[in-house]
Image: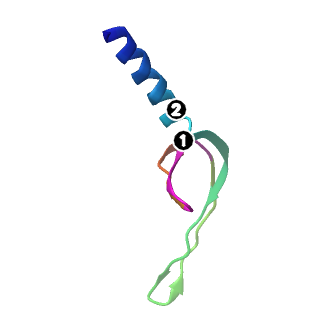
Amino acid sequence: MKSIILALGIILCQQASAQNLTGVFLGAQANTANYNVNYSKQKTNYTYGFQAGVMMKVPFDKGIYFAPSVFTA
């Protein structure tokens, strides 16, 4: 009896997680700033780097999603 309940639980969990979408992203990025001190524009330079992370899309209702992501730059 316990094994049947465990098997049904595993099947239900797999079906529930099948609706969630996961993804990986990787790409280049360029950052800069634009700021003024006493109405005088300050010199800024671009910094270049990379960004990588993972994301998940969890649907709640028609057109409403929870989309957490974790990344490093």
Q: Position of residue 53 (x, y in %)?
A: 56, 41
Q: Position of residue 36 (x, y in %)?
A: 49, 82
**SS for callout 1:** loop
What amino acid is labelled 1 in the image?
A: Asn
Q: Position of residue 66 (x, y in %)?
A: 47, 54
Residue wearing tag 1: 20
Identify the disc placed on residue 15.
2
| Dot placed on the residue nearer the N-terminal end, 1 or 2 | 2
Numbered marks: total: 2
Relative to 22, is 28 above or below? below
Relative to 40, is 65 above or below? above
Magenta highlight on residue 27: no
Query: Badge 2 local density, few (<14 within 10 Å), some, or many (20+)?
Result: few
Determine the residue positioned at 62% across, 63% down. Answer: 45
Q: Residue furthest bottom?
A: 39
**SS for callout 2:** helix
Q: Residue furthest left?
A: 2
Q: Quadrant of the N terminus?
A: top left
What amino acid is labelled 2 in the image?
A: Gln
State the predominant SS element of the stretch in magenta: strand
Relative to 21, is 9 above or below? above
Q: Which residues are magenta?
A: 50-63
Camera-nearest label, 1 or 2? 2
Label pair 1/2, CB-CB below 8 angstroms = no
Q: Please indicate whether residue 47 sits to the left or right of residue 1 in the image.
A: right
Relative to 3, is 27 above or below? below
Q: Residue furthest front?
A: 1
> Residue 73, located in which quarter of the rendered image?
top right
- Observer-nearest of 39 and 56: 56
Q: Position of residue 44 (x, y in %)?
A: 58, 68
